[in-house]
Amino acid sequence: MFKSLKIGSSRSATVVLGVWQDSKRVPPSLSKWKTDVLELLSQKTFSGKRGQIVVSNKVLLVGLGKRGDLNNAGLQGIGGSLIKTLDQIGLHTIDLCLQATIPRGVASSQKIGESIIEGMNIANWRVDMFDGVATTTKRVLKTLTVGSPSKECVSGMKRGLIMSNAINDARRVAATPPNICNPPWMAKEAKKIAKSCGLKCKIITFAKAQELGLNGIVNVGMGSAEKPCMIILEHTPGGKKKSKEHLCLVGKTITYDTGGYSLKISNGMKGMKYDKNGGMAVLGAMEAIANLNVPTRVTAILPCAENMVSSNAYRPDDIIKMYNGVSVEVTNTDAEGRLVLADGLAWGCKHLKPTAIVDIATLTGGVVVALGSFCAGFWCNDTKLRKRVEKSAAHSGERVWQLPLWEDHRNYMRAKHADIHNSAPARGAHPIQGAAFLSFFVDEDIPWAHIDIAGVSSVERDRGLFCAGPTGWGVRLLTNLAESF
C-alpha cells in the first residue's frame, strides 16, 4: 500500500500503455514503444484481458479487455489492478498513456485520467487508522506519482484525485468505531473537514434542538450519554458562473444503532457503526463539491444521534410531536433513522426553501431483500429531479432503482393514537414504509428524492476496488447531481 497519490511527472517514469484483448500487432499509436510492446505481447501469460498487466524496463502494458466492453467502471477496475501491481513491483512513478489506444468515442482523455485515478486511490485505501504493534500489513512509506503527456488526461486525474480523496474521507469516518465516533466527535470532525475545504459549518446542539422542537432527533438520541446534534454544512460557490439553484442534501447520521428498547438480537448489532453511512455520503460529497467549486449552492444537513438503551431512552408507545407538527406514535425504536431524517427534512424545507431536497440513508433491511447489493432503492416525487438523479447515477456508476410511493402507502402509515406510526404493524412493503413516512415531512411544492443505501454502503469482504468495510457509496452520485444543477 502506498502512503498517498499525487499528480506530477518524472522523466524516469515508466509509461503505462494499453492494448485490446487478443491484440497481435502493435497499434500505430504505440509505434514509439514498438520494441517493448512486441516483447510484452509475446508473453504467453498475457492475452489483453481487462486488468492483466505485464512489465518491461520502460513500459507497463495493461489489458483493456474486448473492444466495445470498456466503460467507466472498467477503467476504475484497471486503476485498481494497476496500483496493486505497482505496489508489488515497487514502481513509484508512472506516465499514463492509455489515451493513445482508447478512442475518444469510448472515453475522453479526461475521463480516462479521472476514472483510472479514482480506481487507484480507492483500491489503495484500507482501514489502517487503528493498527497496533501486532499489525503485519504495513504501508509503503512512499508516494505514488502519476503523470501524463496529455493535459486533458492530467486535468481528469486531478478531478479523480479530489473525488476519490472525498470518498476515502467518507470511508474513514464511516469506519471509525462507536467508542470514538459519537455525535460530539462527529460534529468536531465535520468542522475539521469543512475548514479544510472552505465549507461553512454550524452545529445545532442538543439544548438548541430541544428549544426548536427537533423532537425526532432529541428522542432518538436522548438515551445516550453523548447527546445528539444537527450538523449543517454550506457550500456557497465562488466565481461568476453561479447557479440560481439551491440543492439540500440530508444524510442519516446514526453513529451507532443498538435498536433501542426494540433491541437488535443475536449478531444483528454488529456493523451498526455503518448506520451513519448516509451522512458520510453527504459529508464526502460536500468535500468534493467544495474542492471542485461546483457552481451550485448546496446545503447539507446531518441529523446525528446514537440510539442507545437507558432510563432516558424513548420507548415503543411514546408519541412524539415532530418539528413540523406531525405527531408520531413509536411502534419500534429500531425505526429511528426516519425520525432523525424527518426533522432534517422538515427543518430544511422551512428554513432553506431549496430548489430540491434529497435524503440518503441506510434506512431499511427491506431494501436489501428487494434489491440486494446491486443498487440503491430510490423514490422521487418530481419527474425532473428523478431524471437528474438517474442520470447522475448512470454517470457515477452508483446505480439506483425506483420503487413506487402511492397514497395507499402513505395511508398504511396512519396510526391509531397519532397522525402516523414510525413502523407499520406488518413488514409488507418494508422499504416503501420508510419513504412513505418521510413524505409527511417534505413540503409538497419542493421536489424530493429519497435514496436507501442499506445494501450498498458497505461490503463484508473484499470486493472489486473495495476492501471489507464502507464503500463511500453516494459521494460520486451526489456530487454529480449538484453539478447537474
Image (cartoon, rainbow, N blue to C red):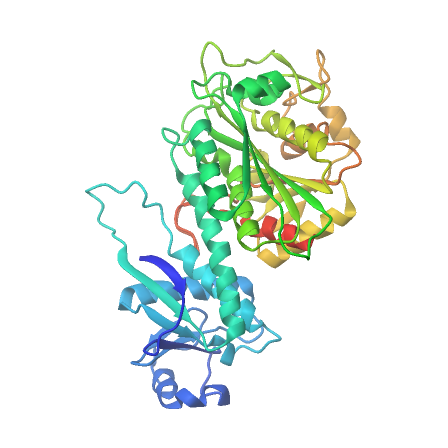
Looking at the image, residue 259 lies above or below residue 66: above
Tell me the residue at 32%/61% (across/down): 143
468 over 310 or under it: above or below: below
| The quarter of the displayed image where residue 415 is located | top right
Q: In which quarter of the image is the N terminus?
A: bottom left
Location of residue 172 with respect to 232 vertically, above or below: below
Q: Is residue 458 visible?
A: no
Residue 329 pos. (x, y %): 65, 15
- Tell me where residue 465 appears, x and y as whole percent: 43, 56
- Residue 8: give x, y in percent of width and height: 40, 69
Report x, y in % for residue 369. 57, 38
Q: Nearer the viewer, residue 260 or 345?
A: 345
Query: Can see residue 2?
Result: yes
Q: Which residue is drawn at 68% across and 52% down?
A: 390
Q: Is 52 rendered above or below residue 471? A: below
Query: In this rendering, would 173 be left or right of 249?
Result: left
As drawn, is 51 to the left or to the right of 201?
left
Splitting the image into 4 quarters, where does residue 380 fall? top right
Q: Which residue lies furthest to the left in this view?
A: 133
Question: 116 or 415, which is in the foreground?
Answer: 116
Number of numbered discs on residues: 0
Q: Residue placed at 49% from the left, 33% from the top?
A: 275
Q: Tell me where residue 103 sits by quadrant.
A: bottom right
